[in-house]
Image (tube, grey):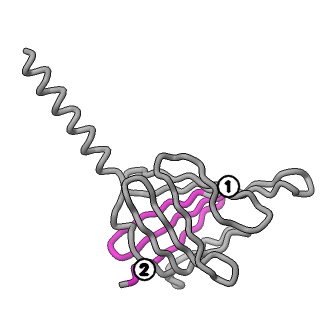
Amino acid sequence: MTRWVIGLFTTATLTLVSLAAGQGNPTLAGSWALDQSGGGRGGVRGIPIATELVIKVDPSQVTMESNTGSARAFQTFVYALDGSEIDVPGPLGWSNTASARWEGDRLVVSSKRTLEGGPDGPMSVEVIDVFVVEGDAMTIERRQGRRSDRLVYNRIR
């Protein structure tokens, strides 16, 4: 009986470890270019659209470089995958935070931009981006409130 319980416990532990390790999607890593003809432009007022993305994936974080800075300069975003909120680059005068997590093989990034000195007090914009890779195409489903847009990127080889 004891061997059976130990065997069952070992099997359950290995199953949980393999499920946890299976979270994420290493195919997200790489260089991506916006497909100008690939559907919606994903525009959310005040949030620039990256036409180029370089993504690196490791077990604890995802690093993205995007050309969303001033004059299309590249900015680097490092997202911890434990869901913790971090400060990220953004427009001057705004407080910019984000968190990221895996939902299966989809990366979900929730971001919030807050302008403290708005005419009626603080004003916030919350956006959720869901990254999905299929072959050499990556789709970002972008949601802000009831508005939903879609960006399509192609892998650069």
Front disc: 2 or 1: 1
Q: Residue furthest top?
A: 1
- Front position in the image: 97 or 109: 97
Q: Is residue 47 above or below residue 82?
A: below
| Left or right, 133 with reference to 40 | left
Give percent across and percent down for residue 91.
Answer: 73, 68
- Local secondary structure at mark 1: strand
Q: Residue at x 39, y 67 (%)?
A: 28
Residue contact at pointers 2 and 1, CB within 8 angstroms: no
Q: Is residue 104 above or below residue 49?
A: above
Q: Label 1 crowding class (10 Å Cα cut-off): few <14, some 14-19, many 20+?
A: some
Q: Residue at x 32, y 73 (%)?
A: 135
Q: Residue at x 16, y 33 (%)?
A: 11
* Dominant secondary structure of the residues highlighted in magenta in the image: strand
Q: Which residue is mark 1?
A: 112
Please state, as top left, top right, bottom left or bottom right, where the C terminus lies in the image. Answer: bottom left
| Left or right, 157 with reference to 37 | left
- Front position in the image: 56 or 44: 56
From which residue to which does the magenta span run?
Answer: 128-156
First reached walking from the N terminus: tag 2 or tag 1: 1
- Local secondary structure at mark 2: strand
Give percent across and percent down for residue 19.
Answer: 28, 44
- Front position in the image: 53 or 135: 53
Give percent across and percent down for residue 73.
Answer: 62, 81
| Quadrant position of residue 4 | top left
Q: Which mark is residue 154?
A: 2
Q: Amino acid at mark 2?
A: Asn
Q: Amino acid at mark 1?
A: Lys
